[in-house]
Image: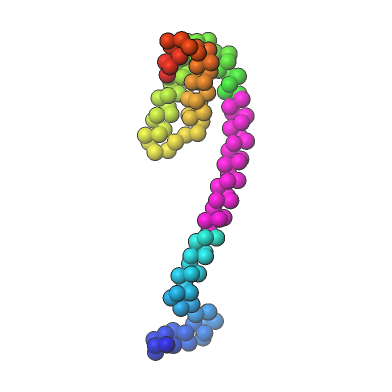
């Protein structure tokens, strides 16, 4: 141990602070802390995703009911608008889950109504 390290350890001991571990142990310590943080983050994010899915289930059911009540012109207008909103959200770098769901569900409803016709892929 160098003189500098021993003085530092004495300083830590005087102040009631545990001295840092040697360099190899420090690297392992940091790796273990990062692994714990990753696990906790994944647990939290999975819980948040489950909560979002529960919220989205109700939203999607309501959206499907609204889309079923629209006539073809309204559905086409809504679908084209949702394509624009979803694209804008993607290019801005902040993807909006609601815009994606509106786009997806309006396209599904349009294709359900016009399956096998020339206008099936209108938006």
Image coordinates of residue 100 in percent, x first then y, are 48, 30
Task: Give the residue displayed 42% in from the left and 87% down from the top.
Answer: 1
Vertically, is 104 above or below 30? Answer: above
Q: Is residue 78 above or below residue 92?
A: above
The residue closer to the viewer here, 4 or 37, is 37
Can the viewer see residue 74?
no
Residue at image coords 48%, 74%: 25
Q: Residue furthest left?
A: 91
Question: In the picture shown, does residue 19 fall above or below 97?
Answer: below
The answer to whether residue 13 is left or right of residue 85 is: right
User: Is residue 55 on the magenta stretch?
Assistant: yes
Question: Which residues, given as a range, are shown in magenta?
Answer: 37-61
Q: Nearer the viewer, residue 13 or 107?
A: 107
Q: Residue at x 58, y 27 (%)?
A: 60
Q: Residue at x 50, y 25 (%)?
A: 104
- Write down the quadrant of residue 122 in the picture: top left
* Quadrant of the image occupied by residue 93: top left
Image x and y of residue 103, in percent: 48, 25
* Residue 118, percent from left and from top: 42, 10
Is any atom of residue 78 visible in this view?
Answer: yes
**Is residue 53 magenta-colored?**
yes
- On the image, the x and y values in percent for residue 11 come to 47, 85
Q: Quadrant of the C terminus?
A: top left
């Amino acid at each position: 141990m160098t003189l500098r390290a021993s003085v530092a350890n004495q300083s830590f001991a005087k102040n009631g602070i545990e001295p840092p571990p040697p360099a190899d142990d420090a690297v392992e310590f940091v790796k273990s802390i990062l692994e714990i943080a990753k696990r906790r983050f994944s647990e939290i994010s999975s819980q948040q995703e489950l909560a979002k899915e529960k919220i989205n289930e109700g939203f999607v059911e309501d959206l499907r009911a609204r889309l079923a009540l629209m006539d073809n012109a309204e559905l086409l207008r809504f679908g084209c608008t949702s394509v624009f909103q979803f694209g804008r959200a993607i290019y801005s770098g902040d993807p909006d889950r609601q815009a994606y769901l509106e786009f997806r569900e309006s396209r599904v409803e349009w294709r359900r109504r016009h399956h096998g016709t020339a206008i099936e892929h209108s938006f």
